Image (spheres, rainbow, N blue to C red):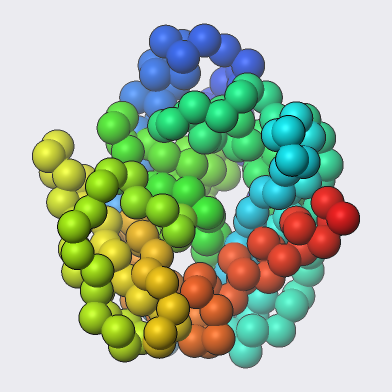
């Protein structure tokens, strides 16, 4: 059964930054972080990645979602084309591309047990980055795996696949800088919803073949969004 919105938590997408702040705080209060097994009983059998590509001027977008099984076989994919709801502004990414992201995920013909997003989770000044926002609205476990940190950093993890170190924000939120592909640049994992930090790290590794900088479902979604843009 495809994913569906939790209607009690839905909100307008085109709103002021002050109104967006209030929405993020309300959704942050609904975020749940707990262990989610990466392998064995209770672990996700299907994971999706979702990413958005834009025209050069940023006025049009293609959101792509790709669902895979544990063998990294593609089970379903979907692309939604449209205009972003607001111009880009730091910490408001969910209001720029969240609607398209959710529509792409809801268009998948299979229901993923886990979603990887190219955006932060709880490592966000109001505790609700894109990964948390999407996870709460869809009621699905999410992990944020962006390529850029939420704040400046002064160190990198070791060179080997799986090397990481934990980043703690001043308000207590934790994420991690981790290397998912040996010799490649690190990414910044943070729990979004229904998975804690230890689980998010383990899930990012399990759903990564080591061939890409990011987990395989997210890499496939990125490729599909870019090819859809043309």
Q: Residue at x 36, y 60 (%)?
A: 188
Name the spot of residue 133 as percent of width and height, x first: 48, 38
199 relative position to 6: left or right: left
| Res 66 visible | no
Q: Nearer the viewer, residue 196 or 62?
A: 62
Q: Is residue 222 at least partly visible in the picture?
A: yes
- Image quadrant in which the N terminus is located: bottom right
Quadrant where the C terminus sits is: bottom right
Q: Is residue 95 left or right of residue 53?
A: left
Q: Residue at x 72, y 66 (%)?
A: 223
The residue at 83%/42% (across/down) is 81
Between 202 and 226, the one lying in front of the other is 226
In-image side of 142 versus 66 (left or right): left
> Would you place residue 208 above or below residue 57 in this image?
below
Query: Residue 38, image x and y in percent?
Result: 39, 78
Residue at 54% x, 60% y: name it. 115
Q: Position of residue 206 (x, y in %)?
A: 44, 82
Corner quadrant of residue 191:
bottom left
**Residue 151 pos. (x, y %):** 28, 44
As drawn, 162 above or below 152? below
Q: Is residue 98 above or below residue 192?
A: above
* Along the line of sight, the residue nearer the viewer: 72 or 54: 54
Please, is residue 98 above or below residue 198 in the view? above
């Amino acid at each position: 059964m495809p994913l569906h919105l939790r209607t009690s938590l839905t909100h307008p997408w085109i709103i002021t930054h002050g109104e967006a702040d209030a929405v993020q705080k309300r959704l942050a209060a609904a975020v749940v972080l707990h262990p989610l097994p990466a392998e064995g009983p209770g672990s996700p059998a299907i994971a999706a990645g979702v990413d958005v590509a834009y025209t050069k001027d940023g006025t049009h977008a293609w959101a792509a979602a790709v669902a895979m099984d544990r063998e990294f076989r593609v089970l379903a994919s979907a692309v939604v084309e449209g205009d972003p709801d607001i111009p880009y502004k730091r910490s408001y990414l969910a209001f720029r591309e969240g609607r398209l992201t959710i529509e792409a995920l809801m268009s998948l013909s299979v229901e993923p047990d886990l979603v990887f997003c190219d955006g932060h989770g709880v490592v966000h000044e109001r505790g609700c980055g894109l990964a948390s926002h999407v996870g709460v609205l869809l009621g699905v476990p999410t992990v944020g795996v962006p390529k850029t940190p939420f704040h400046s950093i002064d160190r990198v993890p070791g060179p080997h696949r799986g090397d990481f170190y934990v980043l703690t924000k001043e308000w207590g939120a934790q994420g991690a800088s981790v290397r998912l592909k040996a010799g490649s640049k690190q990414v910044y994992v943070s729990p979004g919803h229904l998975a804690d930090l230890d689980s998010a790290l383990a899930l990012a590794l399990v759903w990564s073949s080591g061939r890409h900088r990011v987990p395989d479902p997210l890499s496939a979604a990125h490729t599909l969004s870019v090819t859809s843009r043309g």
